[in-house]
Image (tube, rainbow, N blue to C red):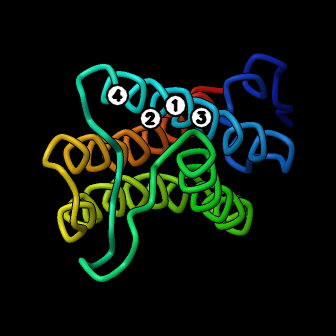
Amino acid sequence: MSTPTSSAIAAKPRLAASRSDTWRTGLLSIAVALLANLLVLGLARLAGADMQVRPDPTVAAMTIGIGLVAVSTALPMLLATVALLALRRWGPRARHALAWTGLAVGLATVPVPFTMVSEANTQAALALMHVVTGLSWFVVVRRSVRAREDG
């Protein structure tokens, strides 16, 4: 009769993420994206972007500032974290898929700033924020999944 050794047990990958690990992953991705997007905002302003947008020419301009960047970054990523929580027991394939989905959403929404009435440098900065958010989610979630797979 054979019993598993402690080295065999230690080598087994931990596939199910704990709730706290999942929250940590989501909150870390939010922090990374938020810091990067605030850096983009600051650099855009230094480069002369006025960060004024209008959904259409008949509406008053809205200034994109720290608060709006924070909410626009954190809220969708918080919703993604809730989705990650829901999928955490489905194993690493589901979390990998959600990582790729977040990247795809970030890239798919890049054209949105170009539908607004604003300066080109403002549009470019906002588009870059969409990329940064998607990439932040992808990198942090994939890193978490790989760490769990490696045990």
Do the numbered discs 3 and 4 sit on residues whose CB atoms are within 8 Å? no
**Looking at the image, is 119 positioned above or below residue 4?**
below
The amino acid pointed to by label 2 is Val
Callout 2 secondary element: helix
Q: Quadrant of residue 5?
A: top right
Above or below residue 15? Residue 9 is above
Viewer-closest of 26 and 70:
70
Residue 125 x/y as whole percent: 27, 40
Q: Which mark is residue 143?
A: 1
Cβ atoms under marks 3 and 1 closer than 8 Å? yes
User: Observer-nearest residue: 84 or 89?
Assistant: 84
Earlier-in-chain disc, 4 versus 1:
4
Name which of mark 3 and mark 4 comes first in the sequence: 4
Q: Are marks 4 and 1 in contact (CB under 8 Å)?
A: no
- Please state if 69 lies on the left or on the right of 28 as rendered: left
Question: How many numbered marks have been drawn onto this rendered protein structure?
Answer: 4
Q: Tell me where residue 65 appears, x and y as whole percent.
A: 52, 43
- Which residue is label 4 attached to? 45
Residue 144: mark in rendering: 3
Q: Label 2, label 4: how many angstroms apart (C-alpha)?
A: 27 Å
Q: Mark 3 and mark 1: span between their CA atoms? A: 4 Å
